Each structure stands twice: as C-alpha cells, then as structure tokens.
Image: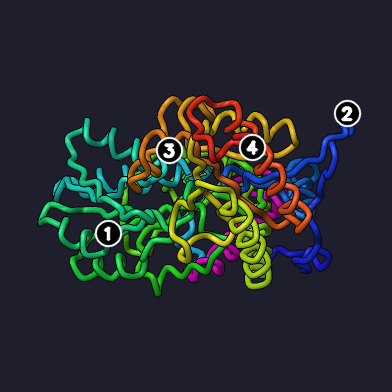
Amino acid sequence: MFIAPQWENPSVYLARKEYDMNTEKRLVYMDHAATTATRPEVAAAMVPFMTSTFGNPSSLYDLAKVSRTAMDGAREEVAVALGADPEEIFFTSGGTESDNWAIKGIAFAKKAQGTHIITSVIEHHAVSHTCEWLKKQGFSVTYLPVDCFGMVNPADVEAAITPETILITVMMANNEVGTIQPIAEIGAIALKHGVLFHTDAVQAVGHIPVDVRAQNIDLLSLSSHKFHGPKGVGALYIRSGVELDSLIHGGAQERGQRAGTENVSGIVGMGLALSLAVKGMPENALRITALRKRLTEGLLAIPKTYLNGHPEKRLPNNVNVVFAFIEGESILLMLNRRGISASTGSACSSRSSEPSHVLTACGVPLEVVHGSLRLTLGEETTEADVSYTIDAVKEVVQRLRDMSPLTPPELRSQP
Ligand SMILES: *Cc1c(COP(=O)(O)O)cnc(C)c1O
C-alpha cells in the first residue's frame, strides 16, 4: 500500500479558506455533491509523480517501475474499498467515462444475446444520455419510475426483465436528493435472472459502505473528485469473468482494456484519498449526519418548506428542500453574495436549461421544483457553517418572498 506514515491519520484537516481576503466575505462551501477539495496530503503525494518520478508506467527502466508500483498500490487501495480484487479495477478519466464504458461496453459485447437495457428515471446524465444514444443504435431502454422519495422498487426491476435484457443499470445513491437505492436487492434479482448489473456509485463510494460481492454488483463506477481526491480520474470495477467491449482503443494499458498513458499522479491521489475516506468513514458519517439533521431542521422551520428525497435512506451529507413561491436561481445568487456555494434543480440554473428530472420524477410539481435548494456537506463543514447557512437561507427566503407578487399575505414579513 502506498501510504507514507504522515498521511495515515485521517483526522488531518482539509485546508480551509474561511474568508475571502479581498471581500472579507465568509466562505461556506455547501456543494460537495458537485465536487470536493483535494486533501492537502493527497495533493502532496501526487506531486512527485509529475516532477521527480514522472516515468511512463509502460517503459522498462527503473524510473517507470516507480510509477507502476505506485499504480499497483492505488489499484489495491481502490479494490479494498470496494471488497474487490485489484485485477477487477480499471482506471478511467472519471465517473462519466466509467458509466459510458460500462453501459456501451456491455451493450456492444452482448448485442447478439439481446438489446434491452433497464435503468431508472433518476440516473445521472452520464447514464441516461448514454442510454439515449444506445437507443439510436437500435437498443431498447426501460426507464423505471421512482416513488415520491426517489426510490426504485426492486419488484419493478424484476417485472421489467425480458429474455432480451442484457443489462440493469441503477445508481447507488442519487446526486440530487441523496436517496440510497436498494442495491443488494436489485443485485440479487439480476443474479437470479442472469442479467448483468451496473451501478453508478459515484456519490456513494467513500461516503457509505460498499461491498461489490455482498451487493451482487457486476460493474461499478466511481470518481475521485467526489471523495476529496483530484479531478479527471476514476475507476470502473468489472467483476472478473465479465466481458465488455473497450471504449477507448490505441494501447495495451489497463490490460488492453483502456488505452492511453495512465494518469499516474491522479491515480495515486485517488488511491490515497479513497483509503483515507474509508478509514474516516464511521466517524465522519456520524458527524456529518448530525450536522445534516441540524441543517434540515433549521430549514424546515421556514414555513412552506419541504424535504426532497428519502427522510432516512439518504447520503449522510445531502440536504435538498423546496421553498414554495421562490425561484431557486435567485436563492443561489443571494446565497453566493453571502459567501455560500449551493445548487438548485431549478431551470436556467447551473447552465442547464431543464428543470431537474429527478425532482419531477419524484412528483414535485414544476412550479415548486423551481424553488429547490441542494446543500451538500463535507469533511470540512463545521457547526458554525451550518448555523451561518440556516440564518442566511432564512433571511434570503423571506426577502425573496417579500419581493414576489405570488407570496400569500401570511408568508410576508409585513402582511
Ligand atoms: C459527478 C457524477 C458523475 C460524473 O463523474 P465525473 O467524474 O465528474 O465525470 C456521474 N454520476 C454521478 C452520480 C455523479 O454524481
């Protein structure tokens, strides 16, 4: 395992910028589902693989061997985190590539046996847009519905299986509302019917326990920058014996399955970040869940505010609420002015032109989807951050409601 002694302590705190030096604004990062800061000790561990020991792992001299050994260590660390074998871990450029590879790779490898794929309506676009593209190539796709908490029913998965079905792909935890899916149950159904099962576990890995054997998972996508590792690197777990086509051709790297000179420094960083995340998980999950509950209660105390996603079966760090009579985009801009980084499922926000497909699938009415706010906590989030955020959101929501002609008199500060 490639861990230097000084990095073994997971309680080493992340570098944290509390104030913007220029504006003297407090900074509160509440968007860990979008990306996370790379841990300083992870960044430090990466540097030598760009500077001193920069060798191409495919070369034959000693310098290259250093890179190879470090990559082997990272593969081992990722495998241990998933309960897999190192030979089952393939490095990629991130969650999007892993999803594309798993789904397209199975579709093309298995098309003589069948052309039907089962997925859900709440997948990340890396999965749903890939499925849409496959439809144009002659595959058929069933989109399973979810209940009002964003949960897929395993009975629906079973009912959707036909003799033509080659792949089931359902995410482990949702990136917008945080709902954790019944993955082991879906895995058992896939196994029983001899259908391969892929899960996009990008939001789950490093945050909640994952065990590919116990959960009957054949393929699993993960991404480093969602667990305090660097961006642009991820992995696909492929259960040994599962054959799929390559997505990227042109070299013998990753045992001939994924061409291109490996992102050695990124891979080393991901391995270390994941082993630290897994080590600190019991403690962090408890602490972050307690903060999340306080934040949720604080926000739900605002009148006409509702929680999205499952009340219990959700990621430790995810809060997603809707405020009636408010535009999510305006909340974001006003929170940004108070130094808070957050996200919304409203249209026109986050450079996307569609309202959240996840919230609409959960049955949230369109006009209410526009008033949604997602706050996702992380390892560096403090009690003070939560208090500051509750106060800021209360103030912003009241100001926006006072400004809106749609607000009923009882919700105005001066009726
Ligand atoms: C972030 C994310 C992805 C994409 O991962 P990248 O590494 O950013 O390409 C895919 N699926 C889910 C659920 C995500 O949250």
**Disc 2 and disc 4: Cα gap in Å?**
33 Å
Q: Relative to residue 264, is residue 158 depicted above or below?
A: below
Measured as percent of width and height from the top left, residue 253 is found at 50, 46
Mark closer to the chain start, 3 or 2: 2
Asked whether disc 3 touches disc 1, contact meaning CB atoms under 8 Å apart, the reply is no
Is ligand 1 closer than 8 angstroms to the Cβ of mark 2? no
Magenta-drawn stretch contains 70: yes
Q: Which residue is mark 4?
A: 413
Viewer-closest of 215 and 305? 305
Q: The N terminus appears in which quarter of the rendering?
A: bottom right
Measured as percent of width and height from the top left, residue 218 is found at 35, 62
**Disc 3 and disc 4: Cα gap in Å?**
21 Å
> What secondary structure is marked by label 3?
helix
Characterize the magenta stretch by its predominant secondary structure. Answer: helix
Q: Which residues are magenta?
A: 55-83
The residue shown at (30%, 53%) is 146
3 or 1: mark nearer the eye: 3
Measured as percent of width and height from the top left, residue 59 is found at 62, 45
Three-letter residue code for mark 3 = Val
1 or 2: mark nearer the eye: 2
Mark closer to the chain start, 2 or 4: 2
Disc assigned to residue 22:
2
2 or 4: mark nearer the eye: 4
Three-letter residue code for mark 4 = Ser
Q: Which residue is mark 3?
A: 368
The residue shown at (55%, 69%) is 80
Disc assigned to residue 363:
none
Q: Which residue is mark 1?
A: 196
Three-letter residue code for mark 1 = Leu
Mark closer to the chain start, 3 or 1: 1
Asked whether disc 1 touches disc 2, contact meaning CB atoms under 8 Å apart, the reply is no
Is ligand 1 closer than 8 angstroms to the Cβ of mark 1? no
